[in-house]
Image (cartoon, rainbow, N blue to C red):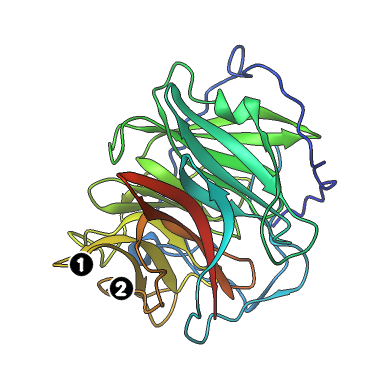
Amino acid sequence: MVWFAMARRSAVLALCGSWLTGCNAIFGVGDLSFDGSGGSPSAGGGGVAPSVGGAGGSGGAGGGGGGGGGGVVIDCSGAFGMPELVVDSNDSLSSPSITGDELAIYYLRSLSNGSEVVRASRAEAMGAFVEDVVVQELTNACLGFGPLTGMDVTPDESAAYLSCGEPLSPDAQVVRYRAEGDLWQLDEVIGAMGTSPAIRDDGLVLYAATDDPVVATRRSVLEPFGAPQVVPGLENSGLTTPGPSPDGLELFGTMTVMGVGTRLGVATRPDPGAPFGMPEPVDVPEVAGTTLTGSGDVSADCRRLYYVGVVAMGGGTSQSGIYVIER
């Protein structure tokens, strides 16, 4: 495991053009017969210790791992409480990605001509995010690949995984960008995998959405990911936009409930070597009139879940926002 310490990104990101030109595409094709150090792909990837220091990103094919900061204690127990609105917007939002200290959150904002990547910040790890800026390098990441349809940023903001292609398409390309100071550079084209990528906090397990959720694993952040496969236990599950908990025992996403509509769902397993069970709706008090439109992103300590919801405002209008629920 390689530890990579990065200076904290400034609140205002410099705006510049795409770094795609002149960057080498490195396709990750690896042996999926991993040992316990990286998790068995037959079980959807191995687990992590209850206290995680995080694996930071580094350059090359294995760079841009994860990392929730030193000594983060993971506790995924307990039921979720009432939702709190933390990002308010009149635009359509998706792909929330919270940082390790929970002082910043990334998300996609849909506009008439496509989607843009936004980073919003707050002074304390509670309450609403009030300052936001468009991250131009990540917004332009899919030029030449297809529409930007999903994103996940590692907790230490060292790497960003973005999907380029039509929603749920297995041909959608996943690319990784690496942070260089206040700028982002293309680090690797991982290849066709699906949309809505989500990297586990240890950087060893990468999920994406097709008709079924898929997963790719690696033993070390210095190695490329192996070929993606359907998450064991979730064949024909209907779970989309998968987002893992840091302990690897929960996989959140969106699911359709008969007679109810779209709900936030979660699939669980008893240990990291087991397949997931079928997803169940998350038992959370919902804000009246709110419908879910995006999957959840779990905080580094597993206590809070950030997700996108839309509230009907009357007159055919709606208001999109990012909510948080806490165990």
Q: Which of 40/230 is in front?
A: 230
Query: Upstream in the sequence, badge 2 or badge 1?
Result: 1
Q: Which of 51/181 is in front?
A: 181
202 up-or-down from 14: above or below: below
Which amino acid type corresponds to the residue marked 1 in the rendered image?
A: Val
Q: Quadrant of the N terminus?
A: bottom right
Side (left or right) of 307 relative to 60? left
User: Residue 37 appears in which quarter of the rendering?
Assistant: bottom right
Is residue 81 visible to the viewer in this orientation of the structure? yes
Side (left or right) of 211 relative to 82? left
How packed mark 1 is, by other alpha carbons closer than 10 Å (few <14, some 14-19, many 20 or more), is few
Q: Quadrant of the C terminus?
A: bottom right
Q: Which of 142/117 is in front?
A: 117
> Residue 47: horizontal and vertical position, in percent?
52, 71
Q: Which residue is mark 2?
A: 281
Is residue 157 visible to the viewer in this orientation of the structure? no
Residue at (14, 67) in percent of width and height: 259
125 up-or-down from 151: above or below: below
Q: Which residue is mark 1?
A: 260
Give the spatial CA distance, label 2 vs label 1: 11 Å
Judged from this view, the residue extending furthest toward the top is 22
Secondary structure beneath disc 2?
strand
Judged from this view, the residue extending furthest toward the right is 7
178 up-or-down from 123: above or below: above
Depth-wise, is mark 2 or mark 1 nearer the camera? Answer: 1
